[in-house]
Amino acid sequence: MKKYFEFDKLGTSYKQEIIGGLTTFLAMAYVLVVNPLMLSLDSVPDLPEAMRMDKGAVFVATALAAAVGSLFMGLIARYPIGLAPGMGLNAFFAYTVVLTLGIPWQTALTGVLCSGLIFIILSLTGLRELIINAIPTQLKFAVGAGIGLFITFLGFQNAGVIVADPNTLVTLGDLSQGTTLLAIFGLLITVIMMVRKIKGAIFYGMILTTVVGMVAGLIDIPTKIVDKVPSVAPTFGAAFDAIIHDPGSLLTTQFLVVVITFLFVDFFDTAGTLVAVANQAGLMKNDKLPRAGRALLADSMATVTGAVFGTSTTTSYIESTAGVAAGARTGFASVITGILFLLALFLSPLLMVITSHVTAPALIIVGVLMVSSLGNIEWNKFEIAVPAFFTIIAMPLTYSIATGIAIGFIFYPITMIVSGRRKEVHPIMYGLWVIFLLYFIFIK
């Protein structure tokens, strides 16, 4: 086992990997609560029940998709990256595809399935890996830093430190709120342990924050540990309904747009996450991602698996950086994360104590670690600074990793051509320039 995952080469241990995998799981566990609420359109009143997905079935589908996806990533690609249904993609699935476009959720699952199958083909042909390796080094650094700002913003938002404001979009939240104070305590204690160079500081910070939250009455103490697993029958296999019973519904421009959007967002969310996590873990070699093809194949297979179980697109989670910060370096950590998602099927009452205020400090700290790549960007060269900056700033401002990548990648060929450096631009980057422009014009 140690030889397969190259423990000695990467300077890690079972303890370090287990803590890393557990930290990633805890940072991702909120998806088990949020995804069923999102896909069932729980926040939208007065909807026909036919438009709502069964929450219990989606919970099971979410856990199984995350477990299988994380195990694929760990065993096939050997990367410390956890997978689960993507949060932006589930919002698009529920609120745009189902609620706004009026597409049945069963057909929407068919769209996810189709996008996953296309991804598998692209991964097996090596095209996805070729695209990721064609991204210039400077923009890879920018992607990592941008994701760092994005998840820091997400962490402050989850903590209640930053809230929405109708006049200024965002503003400082009410710092006297108990849950916000709990998150600030968690941030402070985690920072102290990080400064003291305590291994697993992020994980221990979450545990201490949870305990303090229960003692202070801010987090409910679970009344039981084990609960029965809901039935996945209402959603399992629903992705095949349209293919079998109404194939004509798939031959529309609307359905094509849905599939393309799932493809686009998943592709570049995954690409950004892989690059960011690999950079942070020190796994990049000569500015290229080793075993990128395997990682992308694992991600694609997870999407197909999730669609069959009954959930929106499964993708690599940027919260995996929390596990890397806690010591994860190999796929063994992802195996641990996958096993924990399987156990979560039975231990759902315990998950209720891992609130967004508990995980917020971890996201903020990881953001601090990730923006260190800013120092590697050639800011003195304006043709590099402009696309890098737009990539970085657009991610938190648009609340989308993929959109940030798209904006930066549109400007990169332009500034390089104007500066007389067009020969340094990989031909694939010109192709992406066209694709991104068309995306913003016709889809976004």
Image (cartoon, helix red, strand yellow):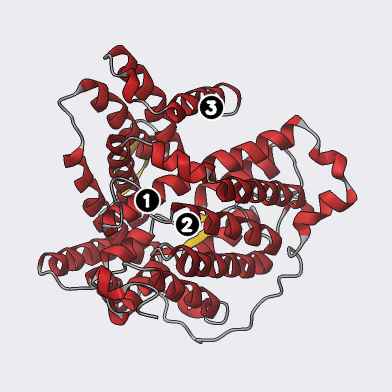
Residue 313 shows which numbered tag? none
Work out whether residue 252 or residue 150 is closer to the camera in this orientation and state it. Answer: 252
Badge 1 is on which residue?
289
Q: Point out the tag, 2 or 1, that comes first from the N-terminus.
A: 1
Name the kind of residue labelled 1 in the image: Leu
Badge 3 crowding class, 10 Å Cα cut-off, few under 14, some 14 to 19, many 20 or more, is some
Name the kind of residue labelled 3 in the image: Ile
Q: CA distance from mark 2 to mark 1?
A: 9 Å
Q: Tags 2 and 1 in contact by the CB under 8 Å rule?
A: yes
Q: Point out the tag, 3 or 1, that comes first from the N-terminus.
A: 1
Give coordinates of residue 163: x percent, y percent. Answer: 35, 45
Q: Is residue 28 above or below residue 289?
A: below
Give coordinates of residue 211: x percent, y percent. Answer: 30, 79
Badge 3 is on which residue?
435
Q: CA distance from mark 3 to mark 1?
A: 23 Å
Quadrant in the rendering for residue 305: bottom right
- As drawn, is 145 to the left or to the right of 411? left
**Quarter placement of the C terminus:** top right
Work out whether residue 400 or residue 186 is closer to the camera in this orientation and state it. Answer: 400
Residue 60 appearing in the image: yes
Q: Tags 3 and 1 in contact by the CB under 8 Å rule?
A: no
Badge 2 is on which residue?
295
